[in-house]
Amino acid sequence: MLKFFRRSKGWQLAGLISPGALWILLFFNLPLLIMLFISFVERGRAGGIKIPPVYTIENYRLFFNSCSSAFSGPECNPFLYLGIFSHSVRIGLMVTFFCILVGYPLAYFMAKQKQVWRDALMILVIIPFWTNFLVRTYALKSVLATEGLLNSFLMNLHIISQPMNLLFNEFAVVVGLIYGYLPFAVLPMYTSIEKFDYSLMEAAADLGASPRRAFLRVMLPMTLPGVVAALVLVFVPVVGAFITPDIMGGGKVEMIGTLINRQFGVARNWPFGSAMSLILMLLVLIGVVIYFRSSTEETRRGI
Amino acid sequence: MTSEFAVEMQDVLKQFVTPEGGILAAVNHVTMQIKDGEFFSLLGPSGCGKTTSLRMIAGFELPTSGKILIHGKEMSQVPAHLRPVNTVFQQYALFPHMTVEQNIGFGLEMKGVGRAERSKRVSEALEMVRLPGMEMRRAKQLSGGQQQRIALARALVNKPEVLLLDEPLGALDLKLRKEMQLELKTLQREVGITFIYVTHDQEEALTMSDRIAVMSKGVALQIGLPEEIYERPADKFVADFIGETNFLDGTVKGQNGSTVEVDIPGTGLVRVESSRTFTNGQQVSVAVRPEKLRLNSDVKEGNNLKGRVEDVIYIGTDTHYGVRMTGGQKVRVREQNLTQAQKIIAKTGEEVMVSFTRTSPRLLTE
Ligand SMILES: Nc1ncnc2c1ncn2[C@@H]1O[C@H](COP(=O)(O)OP(=O)(O)O)[C@@H](O)[C@H]1O
Ligand SMILES: [Mg+2]
């Protein structure tokens, strides 16, 4: 009887998780396997892969040495792709840093309000999610354009005499990414801060900690899980971003995302695009694992 | 400038804006002086302004008006982290992300005490609260009583001039609470630090304190020694809040020297010794403790009033009688069961004589 029960429970569970599991299997795991396969074969002439497939590790070699291709001339820079990678990581870190720097005080401010105001502010943070990402990015572009809102505003006030070049450079890309991903930083940090017990700050003050030290020794470590979540939620998509660098950078700012995007578009090099996608995934995965390890260790030790 | 007082509150007013938009005086023009080395209790029902008073001394709230002095120094410009006081919070407020050692050492660390010295003093503090060897535990891994002791150690290790305790035993069970009461009192005598102790438990305040301030609705009604407050309550609220009191309301019929005659409608004339002067016809309340009333034992030169027993409660050490007086007032009488032979004096429904001396009651006018 008991055995039957247990088995039937197992079946129930299987029944419950199977739609989700099937979905993930079909639309995440299977494509990943296909990508893995493509990354190890030679490219087809007009995109796709050579049929029948010819196995090779050339796609990975090309990434680490961009001159390994037969077409490279004598001026070739072997670190071209590696450079774009590290540059993307740098932009990712910068954007994440600013999102947290701006987002934490904002989340703190929100958490400090009365319940009614908190809900209102929360909706204000979430509303941008309801607007198409492309539309928002184009809107920001028109703000930063040479004859855009910001420049004409500053010129009318005679603060500047000539319009500034705010668009189609790295600055524009970073601003665009911060703008796009700030809510992803605010929400998890808000959740952490809202749970934080402020009487602990009074306890710290009571024991002689200035507001700054109380923050660093008590509030920050205790809200660190939210900060880590924000870091992951912003860094991961930003490193692989391709729409924002494309629009805000005007094709002048190359990031991993735009590079990969190009392999599946004009460059018609699916195998190389797949190889880079997998390398990016691996890199992000390693980063996230290391960060989670170290941060939980830290919170465990109370640093 | 120093002062014989550890803490002085001078006409302190603290107003809050209520959610309804009104103004509430949580602490209403309170003046009190707490002597150096004293165990001073703030006693009163929930919501009477005890915590607010403590928070103003600690520096978490600023008075709306009035002054707070610590050892003669005015505190209005001194932020909480620079005040020479430490607090044991009602919910302990231990840092959950730190070990016991880091918790207790936090104050020393903020003062810049070195690591070696710090860990020595932390283990001394742990000895003091009888939890040696607990350094590496986390707050979550401790029982309520242990957390309470750690909170105490965390405050005391800094050797503050004044220790503020906000109902520190409120969350403990009765037995542990009694134990900790004695321990706290002993500890206070040993370290010689001024304790300001907040409680709503009158028994706790009476057993532990050198002096007590009884508060109600933001006002300090009476400040004095425990026996003063118990034996000579200033008004009906204090008499009622501290221990149990019977009130017999009546009018003054005459005064002969120190003897005041009060007519209790329907019950009879009561004679009470008082140092105060009353006018004829004045409304007063004869307040007398249940343990000062006797049943069926004619008290010479005393008051002997008739009534009928309504309930009898035997509680081991004592027997409590509820008696309805002829005038309709209900009083409680507490007879101690001194000998085994002692019988229940009267049964429910029996007519009895309730007696008390002339010096037992207090005459209260409000
Ligand atoms: N921050 C505050 N805002 C509004 N009212 C408050 C605040 N703090 C306390 N009060 C009110 O002040 C009164 C006294 O509170 P408190 O000092 O906590 O009482 P006690 O500690 O004696 O129970 C209560 O009526 C309480 O609701
Ligand atoms: Mg309180």
Image (cartoon, grey):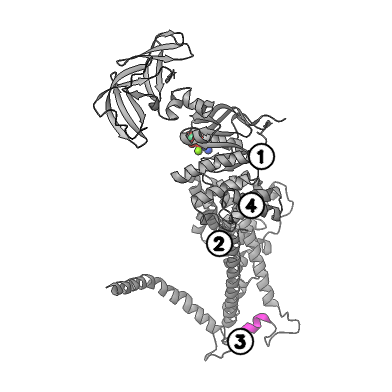
Residue wearing tag 4: B122
Residue wearing tag 1: B84
x then y, percent, for residue B330 = 32, 24
Regarding residue A201, the answer to whether it shows in the image is no
Identify residue type, mark 3: Ile
Q: Could you say which disc has been placed on residue A229 in the image?
A: 2
Label 1 in the same subunit as label 4: yes
Ligand 1 lies under 8 Å from the Cβ of mark 3: no
| Residue at position x 66%, y 54% in the image | B119
Q: Could you say which disc has been placed on residue B93 in the image?
A: none
Highlighted range, magenta? A59-65
Residues at discs 3 and 2 in contact (Cβ within 8 Å): no
Horizontally, residue B22 falls left or right of residue B252, namely right
Secondary structure beneath label 4: helix
Identify residue type, mark 1: Pro
The secondary structure that most of the magenta stretch takes on is helix
Read off the chain for label 3. A
- Frontmost of labels 4 and 2 is 4
